[in-house]
Image (cartoon, rainbow, N blue to C red):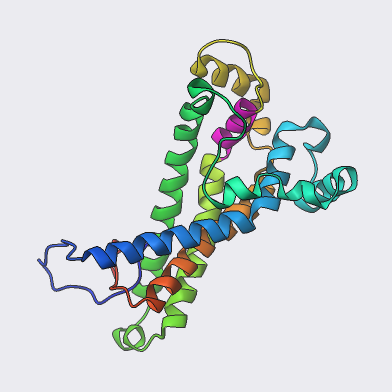
């Protein structure tokens, strides 16, 4: 995650010259933004997952699904897994090593396109925004304005990340609930994918778009704010102005 800095002269090597304190701030900022956004998005994640695995909720919107869950199980149901989610844990129960890594392959299939969409689209949107500004405008941008650009880019990047990784996310939810035949993970994923079909693989995309747009934009915004508050140095830019 980057913040805007002055473009170095042509030929200047993009070699970081950060201190241990700088890296500690980057780590802390990343931990805070991930914990805050994922914890806050727990209700959306609960609805999204239930829409993916519960046939009774398959055709419901985010609000409709949330209302049905609350009516049947109470408001606390929307906070299922809040603690583990907030601190970065994705394993529940007392499973063994095999159970802990049961979803490793679908997680890879999900996270690779998710990360590509998140960072590539975010940087591309930043590039478009700054490329259409004069040098004087860029120099006079306030921290709040720069953060607003990053926030807007994050919303677009979140939508892209959700769409690109949705099929694998649907399969991961199925795997984590124990669905699918016995056999290797690849065989289970192929079988579940065939059973779901193209439409089924994108079940729950609406709620997930809301969730990832909030997550990605919130993470970039909070990350930048924490770094600014702690006087961290600017990052190395990827995009071309």
Left or right, 223 with reference to 234: right
Q: Is residue 69 visible?
A: yes
**Span highlighted in magenta in the image:** 166-176
Most foreground residue, 28 or 3: 28
- Residue depicted at 64% across the width and 28% down the height: 174
Q: Quadrant of residue 27?
A: bottom left
Furthest-top residue in this view: 183
Left or right of 221? Residue 48 is: right
Say whether residue 35 is left or right of residue 232: right
Residue at position x 68%, y 31% from top?
200
Image position, residue 190 (x, y; %): 55, 19
The residue located at (42%, 77%) in the rendering is 146
In terms of depth relative to the viewer, which is nearer, 138 or 187? Answer: 187
Give yes or no for residue 174 being in the magenta stretch: yes
Extreme-front residue of the structure: 94
The relative height of residue 19 versus residue 100 in the rendered view (above or below) is below
- Is 58 included in the stretch rendered in magenta? no
Quarter of the rendering containing residue 136: bottom left
- Write down the quadrant of residue 235 in the picture: bottom left
Residue 81: x percent and y percent?
Answer: 66, 44
């Amino acid at each position: 995650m980057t913040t805007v800095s002055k473009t170095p002269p042509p030929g200047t090597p993009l070699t970081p010259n950060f201190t241990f304190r700088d890296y500690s701030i980057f780590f802390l900022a990343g931990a805070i933004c991930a914990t805050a956004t994922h914890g806050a998005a727990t209700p959306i994640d609960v609805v999204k997952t239930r829409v993916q695995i519960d046939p009774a909720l398959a055709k419901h919107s985010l609000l409709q699904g949330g209302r049905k869950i609350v009516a049947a199980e109470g408001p606390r149901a929307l906070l299922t897994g809040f603690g583990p989610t907030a601190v970065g844990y994705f394993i529940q129960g007392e499973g063994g090593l095999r159970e802990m890594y049961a979803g490793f392959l679908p997680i890879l299939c999900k996270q690779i396109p998710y990360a590509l969409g998140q960072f590539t689209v975010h940087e591309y949107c930043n590039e478009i925004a700054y490329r259409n500004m004069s040098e004087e405008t860029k120099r006079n941008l306030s921290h709040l304005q720069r953060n607003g650009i990053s926030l807007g880019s994050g919303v677009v990047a979140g939508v892209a990340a959700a769409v690109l990784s949705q099929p694998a996310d649907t399969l991961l939810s199925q795997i984590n609930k124990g669905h699918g035949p016995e056999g290797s993970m690849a065989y289970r994923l192929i079988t579940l994918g065939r059973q779901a079909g193209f439409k089924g693989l994108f079940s729950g995309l609406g709620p997930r778009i809301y969730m990832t747009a909030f997550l990605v934009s919130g993470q970039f915004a909070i990350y930048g704010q924490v770094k600014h508050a702690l006087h961290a140095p600017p990052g190395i830019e990827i995009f071309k102005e």
